[in-house]
Image (cartoon, grey):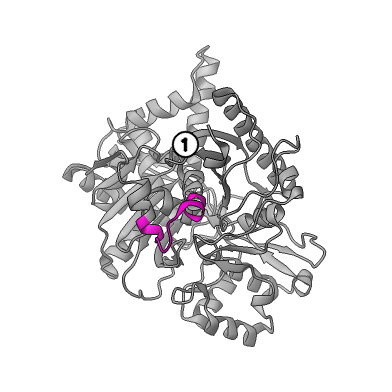
């Protein structure tokens, strides 16, 4: 294998950091990963920058070992690198590079006042997790550090800067910091002026420069190479693609960057991305972001998806160990997911709320996982698992209904990717029941974001003169890709609708739990 003809995508997800190496045919050939978890510190969901360093280095070390095992090669170089991470959040630094406040992740719902005021000012929905909402909330709170901010970035932007020395990011990632004008692929100038008039802050001086997909965005520095690989094996000078958020990499991984295409990413959080062909009204539940090449995208983002499922599966695993059974974690997930398809279509009277944290779509500032049932409910393992899988999609469905019913947004193709779809057919069939439309899953669905980031880096490195990102993906990546398309039957759809009706009716219970249970 010629390492110069490979491309590396590395993504810092909510629970796992993963690196994927692809060859010139865009096929994954090696990977490495490292598990991590956010922490709730003084009411703030956060990761420490030390966790970032340890996680990235261990992930890269795992990739090096995989390359050595498969090809008997030392990973000294690659053709290009792309960095991705969870979108949004708040990472401020002073002029000497000192971190001024804890990293406030997308999971926090502590910026309600700022988000509401900015939405009214811009006439454009500003969600609580966006960087600009965190900044304005810090201003409203009178936080001392605001006046010392020299650079405000996201997790992907921070790591890109560490590795290249460049303060820039892809347009899709930037669209989760501040609204983007798709005509210019840059921050919206009118809104920048309004924010300056409101606060006196010139955002262009502290925000990263915006770069569209396909543009070279720096090279790996000597210090960056040592950060990734402290052994000194990796050489500097490798070109970098613009860093992106997990939304943009999900679109690339599923070939969902053309108008009227869409994808659903489902892991710790879940979100649907639909590339739109017309302006939309302002909806609190709908974010307007962009594709990696700047097209407008309607996004329904939910903070909670699989965390509650993961917790229950861990409990079942603990029970198995107590009984002397040694069950592989992956197999346990697969079998429990498959069991859900045996359950009643409406879950037999069971109900759950998967809210580990607050949820903007349903207007909750905090979360408490709940499971409840009526005395005469059919309390079986199949119904129990189906309940948790439908609960993971319920909030997403509430938001999608605004797009498809209120705004009449057309969707020609919908793809699923992420951990929720790793078990063949199960998550795919239940998502189809939720949206009432066919859902496709590609064979690379489990690779998700890091694979999508690798594709964006490959586009930067290997595109032809004038070749657009949609054309590159259509013609060079996915022309012969294997995928499976499923459509839920009418009984599954009716069952999901019945479950969702109970879910909506019981939402006051979730709100009460957040108020009564500390």
Q: Residue at x 30, y 38 (%)?
A: 482
Outermost residue to the right: 96
Assess whether residue 464 is covered by the magenta stretch. yes
Q: Residue at x 63, y 59 (%)?
A: 154
Task: Classify 410 as above or below 267.
Answer: below
Assess whether residue 446 is covered by the magenta stretch. no
Q: Main secondary structure of the magenta part?
A: helix
Residue 211 spot, x, y in % from top left = 55, 66
Q: Nearer the viewer, residue 351 or 212?
A: 212
Quarter where residue 333 is shown = top left
Task: Classify 243 as above or below 308.
Answer: below
Q: Residue at x 64, y 74 (%)?
A: 136
Q: Nearer the viewer, residue 241 or 194?
A: 241
Quarter where residue 227 is shown = top right
Left or right of 199, for residue 295: left
Outermost residue to the top: 324
Q: Magenta stretch?
A: 457-471
User: Element at badge 1?
Assistant: strand
**Which residue is disc 1 drawn over?**
28
Task: Classify 18 as above or below 163.
Answer: above
Residue 358 spot, x, y in % from top left = 53, 56
Outermost residue to the left: 490
Q: Nearer the viewer, residue 149 or 172?
A: 172
Left or right of 100, for residue 26: left
Left or right of 365, for residue 427: left
Residue 438 spot, x, y in % from top left = 24, 48
Residue 376 spot, x, y in % from top left = 30, 35
């Amino acid at each position: 294998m010629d390492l110069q003809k490979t491309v590396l995508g590395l993504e810092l997800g909510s629970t796992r950091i993963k690196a994927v190496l692809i060859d010139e045919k865009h096929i994954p050939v090696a990977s490495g990963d490292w598990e991590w978890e956010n922490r709730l510190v003084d009411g703030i969901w956060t990761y420490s920058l030390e966790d970032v360093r340890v996680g990235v280095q261990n992930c890269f070390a795992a990739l090096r070992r995989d390359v050595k095992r498969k090809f008997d090669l030392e990973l000294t170089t690659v053709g290009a690198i792309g960095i991705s991470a969870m979108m949004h959040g708040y990472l401020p630094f002073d002029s000497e590079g000192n971190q001024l406040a804890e990293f406030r992740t997308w999971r926090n719902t502590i910026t309600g006042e700022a988000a509401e005021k900015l939405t009214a000012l811009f006439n454009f929905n500003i969600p609580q997790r966006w960087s600009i909402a965190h900044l304005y909330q810090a201003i409203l709170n009178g936080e001392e550090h605001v006046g010392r901010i020299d650079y405000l970035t996201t997790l992907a932007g921070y790591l890109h800067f560490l590795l290249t020395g460049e303060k820039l990011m892809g347009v899709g990632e930037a669209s989760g910091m501040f609204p983007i004008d798709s005509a210019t692929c840059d921050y919206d100038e009118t809104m920048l002026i309004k924010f300056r008039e409101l606060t006196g802050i010139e955002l262009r001086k502290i925000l990263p420069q915006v770069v569209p997909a396909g543009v070279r965005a720096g090279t790996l520095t000597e210090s960056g190479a040592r950060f990734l690989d402290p052994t000194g094996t990796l050489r500097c000078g490798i070109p970098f693609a613009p860093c992106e958020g997990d939304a943009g990499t999900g679109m690339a991984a599923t070939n969902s960057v053309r108008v009227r295409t869409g994808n659903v990413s489902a892991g710790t959080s879940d979100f649907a991305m639909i590339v739109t062909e017309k302006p939309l009204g302002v909806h609190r539940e709908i974010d307007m972001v962009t594709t990696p090449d700047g097209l407008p995208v309607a996004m329904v983002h939910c903070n909670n998806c699989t965390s509650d499922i993961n917790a229950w599966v861990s409990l079942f695993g603990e029970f198995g160990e107590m009984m002397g059974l040694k069950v592989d974690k992956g197999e346990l997930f697969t079998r429990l997911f498959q069991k859900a398809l045996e359950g009643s279509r409406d879950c037999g009277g069971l109900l759950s709320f998967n809210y580990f944290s607050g949820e903007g779509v349903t207007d909750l500032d905090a979360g408490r996982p709940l499971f409840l049932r009526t005395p005469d409910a059919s309390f079986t393992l199949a119904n129990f698992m189906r309940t948790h899988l439908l609960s993971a999609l319920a909030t997403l469905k509430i938001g999608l209904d605004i797009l498809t019913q209120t705004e009449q947004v057309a969707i020609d193709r919908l793809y699923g990717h992420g951990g929720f779809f790793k078990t063949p057919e199960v998550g795919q069939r239940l998502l189809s029941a939720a949206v009432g439309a066919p859902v496709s899953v590609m064979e690379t669905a489990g690779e998700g974001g890091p694979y999508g980031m690798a594709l964006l880096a490959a586009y930067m490195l290997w595109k032809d003169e004038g070749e657009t990102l949609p054309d590159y993906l259509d013609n060079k990546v996915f022309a012969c890709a294997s995928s499976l398309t499923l459509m839920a039957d009418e009984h599954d759809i009716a069952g999901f609708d019945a479950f969702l009706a109970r879910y909506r009716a019981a939402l006051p219970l979730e709100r009460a739990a957040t108020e009564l249970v500390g």
